[in-house]
Amino acid sequence: MGWAVRFALCIVIAVLAALLPDVSWAASPLPRSVLILDQSDSDSAWYGVFAAAFRSTLGAEASAAAIAVYTEHLDLSRFQGRQHDEVLLAYLRNKFRETPIGVLVAQGSASLEFVMRTRTELWPAVPVVFAAVDEETVARLDHRRDITGTIYQLQFGKAVTAARALVPNLKRVAVVGDAWERQAVRRHYKEQIPAFVGQFEFIDLIGLPMAEIRKRVAVLPDDTAIVYTSVTLDGAGASYIPHQALAAFADVANRPIVIDAETNIGYGGTGGFVATPAPVGQATARLALRVLDGEHPSDIPSSAGDFTRPVFDWRELQRFGISESRLPPGSEIRYRAPSLWDQYRWQMIMVLAIVLTQALMIWGLLVERRRRQRAERASRSRLVEVIHLNRTATAGALSASIAHELNQPLGAILSNAEAAEMLLTKESPDLDQIREILADIRRDDQRASDIIRHLRGLLKKGEVKLQEFDLNEAIRGMLHFLEPEAIRRGVELKVQEVPGATPVRADHIHLQQVILNLATNGMDAMSSCAREKRVLALETALAGSSEVEVSIVDSGTGIPDDKLNNIFETFYSTKPQGTGLGLSIARTIVETYGGRIWAENRAGGGAAFRFTLPLVKVPATT
Amino acid sequence: MTTPSPVIHVVDDDRSFRTAIARLLEASGYRVALYESGDQLLQGPPSIDPGCILLDMRMSGLNGLELQERLARLDSILPIVFLTAHGDIPTSVQAIRGGAEDFLTKPVTKATLLQAIEHALARYAQRRERHDLIGSLRARVSALTPRESAVFALVVRGKLNKQIAHDLRTSERTVKAHRQSIMKKLNVRSVAEAVSIAAKLGMLSAPVDGADAKMPDGHPPAEGVDSTKGQ
């Protein structure tokens, strides 16, 4: 083919194109711009969400250059009529005189109707994509050239699905709403309901006065769900905004309420598949894109997608005890009360940390306490052991005297018995004397067993026994051992008791041990004195009205002044053979029973050891 | 004159034991004197009757050993039987060294006690006899004049008349006369007998300074002790 032929063909095509501009507008690409005509005012919540979804979809899915988006709010619910159309028309014509528009998006039925009324005057060639328009409006369009869009239609079936989720064994559905002929967007429910008649019993609460509705919804059977459509004018003629009407009876309803409009959420409805703008925005944006990319609108079927999504009110779910697991998948839960954890997370973590720390500390302290108790028990039992050892040692040191004291009555018994035997061999025994002898034997036996009893008490190793006893008597008991010991060592023993009762509370063996320790110490201190100078005085006296004081005073060498303070310390001894335990044990015992012990040197020579003990009760003064 | 029944002196500060032992001894036929302390025994008049002392070792006041010592100083010839409720070895050794007749521990059986008492009484008789003999010898020696005593002291040490005359600065004749007088007064026939008397009186160990030769100054227990019953 020659170049001339090729050139001629080009000319023909160019001329054809110029001659037939209307035949195929798609031949020239559309301007990359969209004008959204919204039927509401600029504050519309629906539109806000719709536009955001629209723009983001456009931005994300645009294949070529960026698309300019313009928006005009027509406010058609408040301004209507021919005059308003004129004003808008003039405004739009002037505003967009120099601005080419690729696609016109009519948001809402009223907006689409405005576009259809004015299209020929304004943008006769610009393709139209409508959004959220109901089927009837679409059906009424007289010509549909270059038009496509998203149809938005409520379905009663969706309400039933929601009702089944909320009431598992659904048997009845109570429908609340205006008379069907007055319901613009749900009019078709009247035709859809009969399809479900076989499945449920329908409780018809349509067109009732509000008072009657309140009465009826309060006493519905258990297997019932309420489906709220819309009440704008009740049976008594009172007018409502639909969500106000819902709120007016929801508080007394005894069953969950299924709703289908997002605007009704938060007014007592339990939830359901509610119509939402975002999917509409997305679907509309995709249609607009297809048109901008060259598809012919007439080739694109109107999209009647599902623009609802399941939304539920958490407070109502709680009210009817409905588990979230029963809700349709992907359900959105609103008004969820934040849990304490959500609200006070840091505070709770702090409190928990503090409680945990405290618990740990308490546990630690308890462990420590148990350990200490165990140690105290061990040390106590060891102390008791040492005290006992000291006592047996003391008794051992006294054994010569004890044996002497015991053999004295035994000797008397033997001699008495043998004397009696001899008397009995006589012709006429002196029965009076024999009687006397027997009485003496019994007395001596008693005396011997007394000594053994005291000795056993002293040597017994057993539980410490707190008992109330008379201190003077306890000292008297010790004289069994002290007197013979004093005789053995050539010591004069002087005992002076305070008259009257001296009741104290202690283990009386322990106290006798203290007295024994102090008395044998005193005798030790006098071993180097001249015989006639050895005097040991054992005295009790009242110290005030609540204490009794015991003094053990010797006439020995006394205590060096610099050692007066140390002699009660453990292992401190001034005696060559001393263990250094006697006085320390004496102090331990006295202090255990609430007393004090001290030592002092006497002016006339010798030392005095004194200790006090609290009296159990003040002795009666005569 | 029949010999009086012996008196057992019981010294014990335990009244019960004192009484019991007194009953036993009386039933066995002895007379009994009871003392609650050593001092009480010492304060009473000494006994002339045969007897012995049953002495408790451990007493308030004077203890047994101390009393034993005091009695020895008083030249008592009453044998001592110690009776103790608890005896240890040092005390018993000391007691025996001090001349104790026996050392018994309480309780004591009648047999042991009476046997000890019999031994003690036998010892008493022995001592009494010896004591009496020495008494008579002493009486005889004390009948000598001082000059005769001086001569006697030298004679028994085996000095010859000549030496004695020289020592006493006198003549041999005078010494001879004294010797005869001495032999007569002492009722001895030989110097050996005179030496024996001197030995019995313990004069041989005395210092040899002539006329002042010491005589033992002990005396027999005073006369006239009453048997006091225990209280």
Image (cartoon, coloured by chain):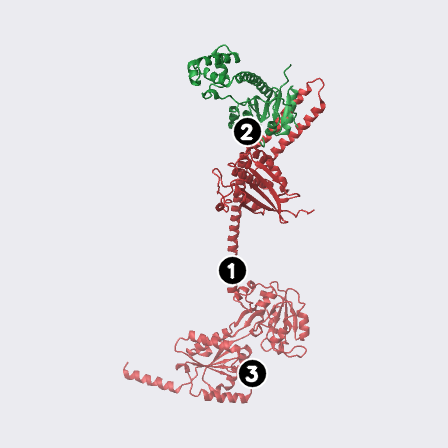
Chain colours: A red, B green
Q: Residue at x 51, y 17 (%)?
A: B145
Residue A431 image point, x, y percent: 72, 23
Amino acid carrying label 2: it is: Glu
Asked if badges 2 and 1 are on one and the same chain, I answer no
Amino acid carrying label 3: it is: Ser
Asked if badges 3 and 2 are on one and the same chain, I answer no
For numbered disc 1, what is the local secondary structure? helix
Disc number placed over residue A354 in the picture, else none: 1
For numbered disc 2, what is the local secondary structure? helix
Q: Nearer the viewer, residue A125 or B51?
A: B51
Q: Nearer the viewer, residue A4 or A282?
A: A282
Q: Residue at x 64, y 14 (%)?
A: B2
The Cα–Cα distance between marks 3 and 1, rounded to whole angstroms, is 60 Å
Q: Quadrant of the C terminus of chain B?
A: top right
Q: Nearer the viewer, residue A376 or B25?
A: B25
The Cα–Cα distance between marks 3 and 2, rounded to whole angstroms, is 144 Å
Task: Write down the chain letter for disc 1.
Answer: A
Question: Badge 2 is on which residue?
Answer: B66
What is the crowding at mark 2: few (fewer than 14 residues within 10 Å), some, or many (at least 20)? some
What is the crowding at mark 1: few (fewer than 14 residues within 10 Å), some, or many (at least 20)? few
Residue A451 image point, x, y percent: 61, 33
